[in-house]
Amino acid sequence: MSGAEATVEPISGNAPARGRKVVRHLGTDDRSSTRVRIVDATLRCLARQGAAKTTLDDIARESGFSRATLYRTFPRGKDAILEAVVDTETARLFSSLAVLMGEATDLEDVLVAGMVEAARRLSAHKALGYLVVHEPGLILPHLTFADMDRILIAAGDFAAPFFARWLEPDQASRAAEWAVRIVLAYVADPAPGTDLTDPDDTRRLVRTFVLPGILALRASAEEFSVPPPPPPTTTKGAVQ
């Protein structure tokens, strides 16, 4: 453990309880096997031919259901199915992250665990990879301006409780947003010499750049939180 992380002590009462859902996400409370089969079939179609060429007939054949079953499950058709794919994959990602980040024992470990798992899952996602290469217009608008802000807020709200074991809430939110930005930047344009899917590479990045910045943020907050000394008092009757 480096000297930097040794100074970061847990803040009592802020750890996310084991076994408790930290944040609720759309799509996670529907246990219908029909829905899951349709979503997974759609993912396979997207990985082969993208969103533009994927039809309801393709999804029906891939899932083994009829078009009528697809419409009963998703009355709005293809658009609703694609929305369910996004919701379900987001929930799966957050579920996987929650397990690994919940097991972390210090701030450095929670950063490394979250960044590595997110980078691995996003980089290996076949459907996402196809869309980024062949249909970037479907993906890139969500990584800019207001849509990007929504992604950062959602991801930050999820990750902040794990960081809050060692940071104050506002610091945890900023640290979470920083980590999310790094992962998204890596997935969009991998940097030569740094592989966020590799724990050793990620740990070096965290120790060199991320953790010092977070600790400086915490030190700055603590400095401003110290009350100023009281003004000097004068003895009654003293000569001015």
Image: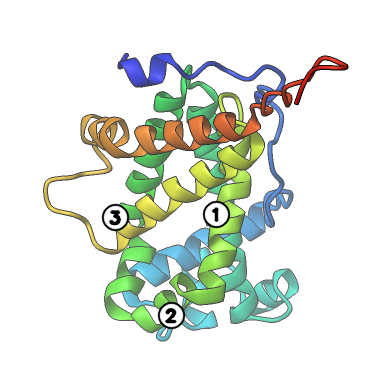
The residue indicated by pointer 3 is: 186
Q: CA distance from mark 2 to mark 3?
A: 19 Å
- The residue at 54%/46% (across/down) is 174
Q: CA distance from mark 2 to mark 1?
A: 17 Å
Q: Residues within 10 Å of mark 3 (few under 14, many from 20)?
A: some
Q: CA distance from mark 3 to mark 1?
A: 18 Å
Secondary-structure class at tag 1: helix
Location of residue 82 by image quarter = bottom right
Secondary-structure class at tag 3: helix
The residue indicated by pointer 1 is: 90
Frontmost residue, 238 versus 129: 238
Q: Tell me where residue 22 appears, x and y as whole percent.
A: 68, 37
Frontmost residue, 69 versus 184: 184
Q: Tell me where residue 59 appears, x and y as whole percent.
A: 51, 73
- The residue at 30%/39% (across/down) is 209
Residue 138 has which mark? 2
Q: Is residue 52 left or right of residue 14?
A: left
Which of the two labelled residues, at mark 2 and mark 1, occupies the earlier sequence position?
A: 1
Frontmost residue, 216 versus 2: 216
